[in-house]
Image: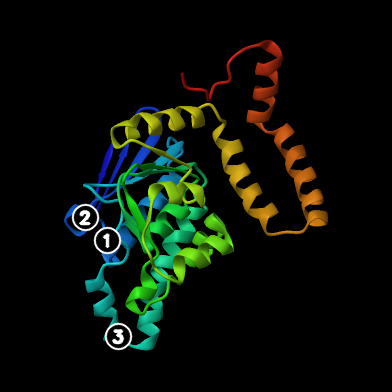
Amino acid sequence: MTTTYETIRLETDARGVATLTLNRPDKHNALNGTLITELCDAAGRLVSDKSVRIVVLTGAGTSFCAGGDFNWFASNVEKSRAERVEQSATLAHLLRRLDTLQKPLIGRINGPAYGGGVGMISVCDYTIGAEGARYGLTEVKLGLLPANISPYVVARIGKVHARETMLSGALFDSARAERIGLLTEVVAADALDAAVERVVHDHLQAAPGAVADTKALIAYVASHDLETNMIYTADRLADAWETGEGIEGINSFLNKSVPSWRVK
């Protein structure tokens, strides 16, 4: 199934694997108002579509995402302060929506990514990059700040690596992107699809409801103290024992059968 947009493509296969493609290849998939709005709409569809189990995020053409479109930036300069804040916040809301997506978000990073493109990588749960691509948090070179993306980039690569990359704006290669944690793994460009399929297959073995609850669990425990987490996690495991998935999973293990959610 394919959903038609102006600046993105959304396609879902029979397994429930949705591919969300940034589709402005002539602009290196730079983020503008239309693309951000359409991505937010697509994310909403993906959340509500119970048949979708996994989302793969990628770019059309030779780039993943070149960051913010400078024509979009320029159009915002003439606006009022309140309007500029509103426009800036659209990207923040998009990143938040993708970061909290209740399904695995796999980054198929097919080429270079700068600025906001690095932010888009940072909200993915697992990222696979093609060898030879370059990355950069280049905002300071242009007198700008990596503002809306910073919570996700810092969470992804840590404060030390954020300072190393953000304060100079210097470009870095895929090997360093993997070393600092931006990319989970790096493969040859012609092996990218096979690597994504391997990771997708692994995720198709997991129960969808348990995956959604585990993403929420990770977010919660990362932002709370140990005493609070002890109470929260005890409740969550007790809850899991009572779910249909939990009961089926335990019984399938004891009976040496295959639970209904696993895809060969």
Q: Choose between 1 and 148: the one closer to the eye.
A: 148
Q: Residues within 10 Å of mark 2 (few under 14, many from 20)?
A: many
Amino acid at circle 2: Arg
| Residue at screen point 31% across, 53% down | 112
Q: CA distance from mark 3 to mark 2?
A: 25 Å
Looking at the image, can residue 148 be seen?
Answer: no
Amino acid at circle 1: Ala
Give x and y (percent) for residue 83: 35, 82
Residue 60 appears left or right of 184: left
Image quadrant assignment for residue 72: bottom left
User: Which one is in front in this view, the residue at disc 3 or the one at disc 2?
Assistant: 2
Total residue callouts = 3
Q: Choose between 29 and 44: the one closer to the eye.
A: 29
Give x and y (percent) for residue 218: 64, 49
Q: Which residue is mark 2?
A: 24
Query: Between disc 3 and disc 2, whose residue precedes?
Result: 2
Q: Which residue is mark 1?
A: 30
Give x and y (percent) for residue 157: 53, 56
Task: Tell which residue pokes out farthest to the top in this image.
Answer: 256
Kind of element beneath mark 2? loop
Amino acid at circle 3: Lys
Task: Using the image, determine if residue 218 lies above or below residue 151.
Answer: above
Q: CA distance from mark 1 to mark 3?
A: 21 Å
